[in-house]
Image: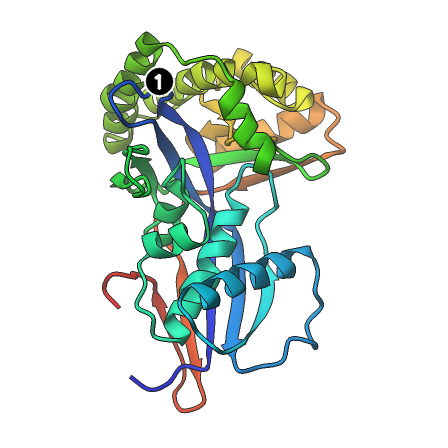
Amino acid sequence: MKDKTHIQITSPARLHLGFMDLNGSLGRKFGSVGLAIDSIETSITVSKNSMQNDIEINEVNKRAYAYAELMLKAYEVDESVKINVHKKIPEHAGLGSGTQLALTVGVAISKLFNLNLSLMDIGKVLDRGNRSGIGIGAFKNGGFLIDGGKGKSAELPPITVRQNFPENWRIILLINSREKGIHGQKEYNAFKTLKPFPEDLSEKTCRLVNMVILPSLIEKNFNDFSASIGKLQKIVGTHFSPIQGGVYSNPDIANIMNYVEQNGFMGVGQSSWGPTGFILTDSDTAAHKLTKDIRQNFLCKDLKIEIIKGRNQGSCIEFISSNKGSQNKNLNIHKE
């Protein structure tokens, strides 16, 4: 293979739909349920042996360069890189921005310097995926995802289920750009201070995921799928409510969710710590009608409302070399 001098990677945002087992008495804890989503993404270009001083160093670029420095140091690569961040997932909104930025940088460096690293290798070096494997799964293959939780070893949570999300279903996102979800040290402290999660509730959520959510998705039974996602969200959100001030961290989004539930839309929730909320609908028509209804009944000046699809493919990679031009492909890190 000829030398690659530039690499562009685009990776999808994800929704974290809830945990299966916050009790952990069987030896594995968390067990995340999630979905890669379309239209919201991180896109970067990385090149080697270049000067950085012609790039505007904003906060996102600082994080990108910090990830690059960790990677280069960890694998003793005595070279520099230049990073352009073209698109970014909104930060600390519950959409997985940090993990996608880290993975795009890590994979780019692995490819540029022929390090042959797995996503798990990169996740460990850059301290991503400690509680949830959904971000790594979304990066690799997209789709609807379940991970097996965090065990007692240093291994990151493995993806145990990956299914396509129906093409005709739509998700309405409510994004508050002025508010940030809990993250960093506050997130670490939150998990430490929460009361123990009851074992019987973990049994209920595991049963809900495996006996309703997953089979109804495979059968494309929207009513059962959306209602059970809503139930999972209520259980998990209630557990986190002492930290975030309710099932939803944002009161305006909470009011909208109560309204749409009263109008028959049961697949509602908050992604991760929020503040982003989501509403599941069974068609583009239903999504647009409900969005119009929300705008007519609520003052949404701080809310960005988007209608999106699930994304059934992972990240996209483009190699650019001085010899061969460009070559586009879907990223499957294990087959390259």
Frontmost residue, 291 versus 142:
142
Element type at mark 1: loop
Q: Quadrant of the C terminus?
A: bottom left
The amino acid marked with disc number 1 is: Asn
- Name the quadrant containing residue 327: bottom left
Q: Percent position (x, y) of residue 303?
A: 69, 34
Residue pictured at 42% horizontal, 13% vertical: 196
Would you say residue 316 is visible in this rendering?
yes
Q: Percent position (x, y) of residue 253?
A: 64, 24
Answer with left or right where residue 277 lies relative to residue 117.
Answer: right
- Residue annotated with mark 1: 23
- Name the quadrant containing residue 77: bottom left
Residue pictured at 57% horizontal, 70% vertical: 83
Q: Percent position (x, y) of residue 198?
A: 37, 9
Q: Where 154 falls versus 53 (above or below)? A: above
Q: Where 11 falls versus 53 (above or below)? A: above
Residue pictured at 58% horizontal, 81% vertical: 50
Q: Where 2 falls versus 87 (above or below)? A: below
Total residue callouts: 1
Frontmost residue, 274 versus 193:
193
Report the colour scheme: rainbow
Residue pictured at 59% horizontal, 69% vertical: 84
